[in-house]
Amino acid sequence: MYSEKNIILRASVASDTGSVRSVNEDNFYLNGIFISSSMNEKSIPLDINEADSFFLFAVSDGMGGETHGNKASFTAMNELKKAHNLIRSNNDGNIEECINRINSYINNTNKLIYNLSLEYGARIGTTFAALLLYDGRAQALNLGDSRVYHFRDNEIIQLTKDHTEAERLIRLGILSPEEASNSPRRNMLSRYLGISPEEGTVEADVSDSFSVEKGDVFLLCTDGLTSMVKDELIKNIISSENLPSKIAPKLIDEALKKGGFDNITCIVVKIEDILI
C-alpha cells in the first residue's frame, strides 16, 4: 500500500496514575496498542521496534472525573484503531487522504463522546495529540493541551498548539507566557473531543509535514508531564539517553519528583533508519 520509504524505529510508552489521583484518565495509541477499558495498572511501560512505511501514535487525556474521563480517552483510542485499520486497508499513500481520514475520525469520535456525556448526564471529553509517520515524512495534529515535540540536533520544537483559554489570550497579546502559566484559565480547553454541537465544529490543528532523519526523536505527552517538567529539562533528558525505553520512564520519574499532580503519559519515538 505505502510507498517507497520504510522507517525503522523504536518507540516506548510510559503512563502513570501519578501521586494524587486514583484512576488513570489518560490513554495512548502505540501504532495499534492502547489501554483496554479493563486495565487500571498504576504504571504501564510498553516498547516496539518495527519497520514500516506508515506509523500512527497518539495520546489522550480524559476529562470528566474519575468515573467518566477514562471512558472518553478509551473511546478516542478505540475509535482511532478503527481509523488506523481503514487507512491501512484503503489508503494509496497520499498524505492528504491520511489527514482526511483522521479528520473524519475526529468528527465521528467527537459525536460519540458528546453522546456519552448525554448518556452519563455529565460533561466529558478528551484531548487528542497524534503523530503520523509516512513515506519518510512526519506530521502532527492535536486538540487540547496534549503535545507533540520534535527533537533534532539538540533542539526541541513543539509541533502542536495548545488549545487553552490562556494560550488564546497569549496570542491576542492580553497575557504574557509568564502570566498565563499562573492564570486560572491555563487548563480551560477551547478544543477537545466531546465538544457540543452548539460550540461549533471541532477541528484539529495540523502541523506542516517534513522529512524525518535518522536520529530524530518525537515525544507525545499529556499535560501531566508538561505542567510539571519544563521544555529545557525535557530536552536534557532526551539528550542524555539513546533508547526510548530509557527516556520515557525518566520523564515520568521527573514529573513524579516534581509532584505528579496529574496522570502522566508519554510516548517517545526514535528514528533508527530510513530505507529507500
Image (cartoon, helix red, strand yellow):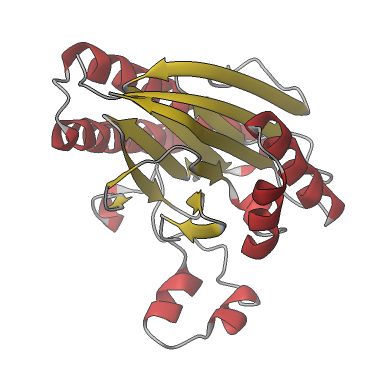
Q: Is residue 1 above or below residue 212?
A: above
Quarter the C terminus occupies: top left
What residue do we see at 41% from left, 55% from top? Answer: 160
Q: Position of residue 187 (x, y in %)?
A: 57, 62
Left or right position of 259 against 140 = right
Which residue is farthest bottom?
Answer: 174
Left or right: 22, with 155 as reference point? right
Determine if residue 85 is in view: yes
| 32 shown above or below 100 | above
Q: Tell me if I can see residue 68 in this picture.
A: no
Q: Nearer the viewer, residue 11 or 80?
A: 11
| Residue 46 shown left or right of residue 105 in the figure | right
The residue lying toward the viewer, choosing from 226 and 4, is 4
**Quadrant housing residue 258:** bottom right
Q: What residue is rendered at 86% in x and 52% in y?
A: 257
Q: Position of residue 121 (x, y in %)?
A: 50, 39
